[in-house]
Structure formats: C-alpha cells, structure tokens
Image (cartoon, rainbow, N blue to C red):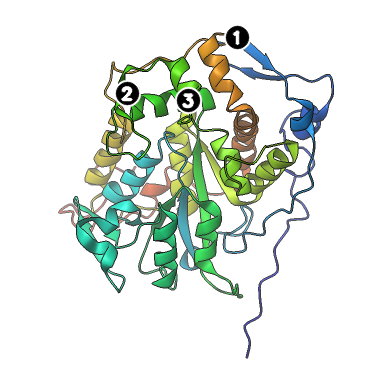
C-alpha cells in the first residue's frame, strides 16, 4: 500500500489568527499597514525610537506559506515518542546555553557541529559519540551540506538516535522528515530563543572581533567602531525574517515577507525570550518532557551553573555597549533590522499567548517523576529535592 500523506493541520479555534498582536485592539499586522503608523518599540532605556518603512517595503506581496509538514504545529498534542526536539538556533540568543543544558545537564544526545569533529564527517553510518563529556550523533546539522548528509544517513528514521537537533536552517531541517510525509511518522517540534535585534547585533559584533575561527572574522575588525561594522558587508540584514521565509540577503523584503515570517512562528515555533531565559527554558523542558533521570542533585547544579555563566559568551567587561536609540550607530543597525524588530515585537506578544499551551503541564517539570539511577539515597525526598 502507498502511505497516505498527511494533510496540513489548521486549528479552527486558533486565537492567534484573529489577533496576532495579543492585547492590541487592532491586529498587529494591520497596525503596521496603517499609513499613519510609524513602528515604535520600547528600547533598552525605556525611550522610544521611530522608523518608517518605505513605500516598497509596505507592499504586501502575496507569498505562499510553507507547509513545513515535517514540523509539528504548536497546538498539536505532545506525543513524545513520535517527535524529535529541534532548536532553531538564532545566533547570539542563548541557544548554545540551551544546547549545553540539554547535553551536559539532561544527558541528551545532540546533533550539531561538534559531532563531526576528529574526522567523523567521513563516517558512513550513524553513531553516538562521547565528545567533551557529552553525547553527540556524528552529523553536522548547522550547515547545509551537513543536513544533506544527515538526511542521507536517515538521522530521523528513529527517535533512538538523537534527542535534540540544533540548526539555524528551519526549512532544511523540515526536509529531514520527508517527503513523503505519512501518518504516524516521526516529526519535529521546534523551539527558539528571541533577543532584541539591536542587542543581538552588538553581541554578534563583539563576538566576531575575537572569533578568529569563524568564516566572517576579519583581523581588521578588532579595530572597528560600531558604525564601521553597521555599514560593512559583514552585518546581517534581517536575519530572522529571511531564515523564516527562506530568502537570501539579495532579496528585497516587504510586508508580505514579514506577514509570512509571523505566520511561520505562530504555527511552528514555540517562542522563548532571552530576556526571560529561565522561564523560557522551563517551558522548553516541559514541552520536550525532559526530566532528571540519573542524578537530580548533580543535574540541577549543572543547570544552575550553566544559567549563571552561559555558553559561547564574550569575555566580561570587553566589547562595545549597545548604543543609545537615536545615535548614528543605533540607526545604522536599525536600518538592517527593521523587519526583525517587528518580528521580535510580535514574538514578545506570542510568548505571552503561548503560555496557555503549557498551563496544563506542571511547573518545574524536570523534577516531575524524576529518577536517580546514580544516587545512593533511596528517594528524591531524601535528597531534599521534593517535599
């Protein structure tokens, strides 16, 4: 028999459709399209900065919404035995910390660039490796070539091989699961961290000034000012919007792209905010059903340590601060992130809306029915972790 292909599910009761802006009386996108509207955002110091979109950018180009059949809709029931967690990794948003907490503290097998170190990119079969005291599958899901290889090796054929896929490429990760897409198949469930775009741009600049191992690194960047970075060909242009709608940096963006990007995260991405990092992490653990299984005391200490110091961060006290709104440096960066700023504003409202998707899941889920295979104490209560 030919497998029956899955029809894309739409939730008829989805309240995000009518008012994607959350508490606003006017739907969020309609606000943007109001001719008298100038986009405003609450900035880091509490002031507001206004910017206008050009006539070309205000066009609402009719674009096909990608099905992304391989990725579960946010409102789909959690079926942990038939779904694989995916971290859509937006650079410099705390994603590496989420990845390390999953690997080091929860003991999960990760698919990312680390799995192909020491020549493992030439392996002809999938295997789980112990590298840097964590478990990785021998594929690289952070590059396009690596994702092609991961699909060829059938990474997602069974759930037993990988516990978390980390990648900046949402559409290509979707293709790991098909076509064809059939009833009952393993599918992905996506989370991500969002960060204020101006903060993210400055963090990226500070990182690239010292990250000589990155392809974007240039030695002369160590002496650059923020203005030089913002006017160079190195700075990203609306990176999140472009990744969500699957267009490259040469494509001029308009409101049609923003509308499409908003629809993708509404349907397919469970939102976390770097400004509410621990709350976001708790939601991810609940959505993915991550519980402590081998030593809750040590696992919680590991988690607390990771949250305190972070991963892949620039040295403290070094780097450029976020420029004040209205300064030339700020405006240069903003000119490259107008769509991402609106997407971030939407993500903030969506974070509050999506709280209802986890209201039935117990808080502190990592402790719920946790087990302690390496403990000497007989129960978690003996360890002081449960009442």
Whichever of callouts 3 and 1 sits on the residue coming sooner in the sequence is: 1
Direction from residue 105 to residue 360 in the image, left or right? right
Q: CA distance from mark 1 to mark 2?
A: 34 Å
Which residue corresponds to the image point at 19% horizontal and 50% vertical from the top-left? 132
x, y (%) of residue 326? 58, 9
**Front residue of this view, candidates 324 and 157:** 324
Q: Nearer the viewer, mark 3 or mark 1?
A: 3
Query: Within the image, what quadrant is residue 328 found in?
Result: top right
Quarter of the N terminus within the rendering: bottom right
* Badge number at residue 185: none
Q: Secondary structure at mark 2?
A: helix
- Per the image, label 3 sits on a secondary structure element best described as loop
Residue for point 22% across, 44% down: 298
Residue that label 3 marks: 232
Inspect this view and state whether residue 39 appears: yes
Circle 1 crowding by C-alpha within 10 Å: few under 14, some 14–19, many from 20 = few
Q: Are marks 3 and 2 in contact (CB under 8 Å)?
A: no
Name the mark nearer the viewer: 1 or 2.
Answer: 2
Q: Secondary structure at mark 1?
A: loop
Residue 301 at what x, y percent from top left?
25, 39
First in sequence: mark 3 or mark 2?
2
Residue 220 is labelled as 2
Q: Determine if residue 359 is in view.
A: no
Q: Residues within 10 Å of mark 3 (few under 14, many from 20)?
A: few
Residue 150, x across and y down, in percent = 40, 65
Q: CA distance from mark 3 to mark 1?
A: 27 Å
Q: Looking at the rendered structure, which numbered label has been put on residue 47? A: 1
Judge whether 5 appears above or below 324 on screen. Answer: below
Q: Which residue is nearer to you in this view: 149 or 372?
A: 149
């Amino acid at each position: 028999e030919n497998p029956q292909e899955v029809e894309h599910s739409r939730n008829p009761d989805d309240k995000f459709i009518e008012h994607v802006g959350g508490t606003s009386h006017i739907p969020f996108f309609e606000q943007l399209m109001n001719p008298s509207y100038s986009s405003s955002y609450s900035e880091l110091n509490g002031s507001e900065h206004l910017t206008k979109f050009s006539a070309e950018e205000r066009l609402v180009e009719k674009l096909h919404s990608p099905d992304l059949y391989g990725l579960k809709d946010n409102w789909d029931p959690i079926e942990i035995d038939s779904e694989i967690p995916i971290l859509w990794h937006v650079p410099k948003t705390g994603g590496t910390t989420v990845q390390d907490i999953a690997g080091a503290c929860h003991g999960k097998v990760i698919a990312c660039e680390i799995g192909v170190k020491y020549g493992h990119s030439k392996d002809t079969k999938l295997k789980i490796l112990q590298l840097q005291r964590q478990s990785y599958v021998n594929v690289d899901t952070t590059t396009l070539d690596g994702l092609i290889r991961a699909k060829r090796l059938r990474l997602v054929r069974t759930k037993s091989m990988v516990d978390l896929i980390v990648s900046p490429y949402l559409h290509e990760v979707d293709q790991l699961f098909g076509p064809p897409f059939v009833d009952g198949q393993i599918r992905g469930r996506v989370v991500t961290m969002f960060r204020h775009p101006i903060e993210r741009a400055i963090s990226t600049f500070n990182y690239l000034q010292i990250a000589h191992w990155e392809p974007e690194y240039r030695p002369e960047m160590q002496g650059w000012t923020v203005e030089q970075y913002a006017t160079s060909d190195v700075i990203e242009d609306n990176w999140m919007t472009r990744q969500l709608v699957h267009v490259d940096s040469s494509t001029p963006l308009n409101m049609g792209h923003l509308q499409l990007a908003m629809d993708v995260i509404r349907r397919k991405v469970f939102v976390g905010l770097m400004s509410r990092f621990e709350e976001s992490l708790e939601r991810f653990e609940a959505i993915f059903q991550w519980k402590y299984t081998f030593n809750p005391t040590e696992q919680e200490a590991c988690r607390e340590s990771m949250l305190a110091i972070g991963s892949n961060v620039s040295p403290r006290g070094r780097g450029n601060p976020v420029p004040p709104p209205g300064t030339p440096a700020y405006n240069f960066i903003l000119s490259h992130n107008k769509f991402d700023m609106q997407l971030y504003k939407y993500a903030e409202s969506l974070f509050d809306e999506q709280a209802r998707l986890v209201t039935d899941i117990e808080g502190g889920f990592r402790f719920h029915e946790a087990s302690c295979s390496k403990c000497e104490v007989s129960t978690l209560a003996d360890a002081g972790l449960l009442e």
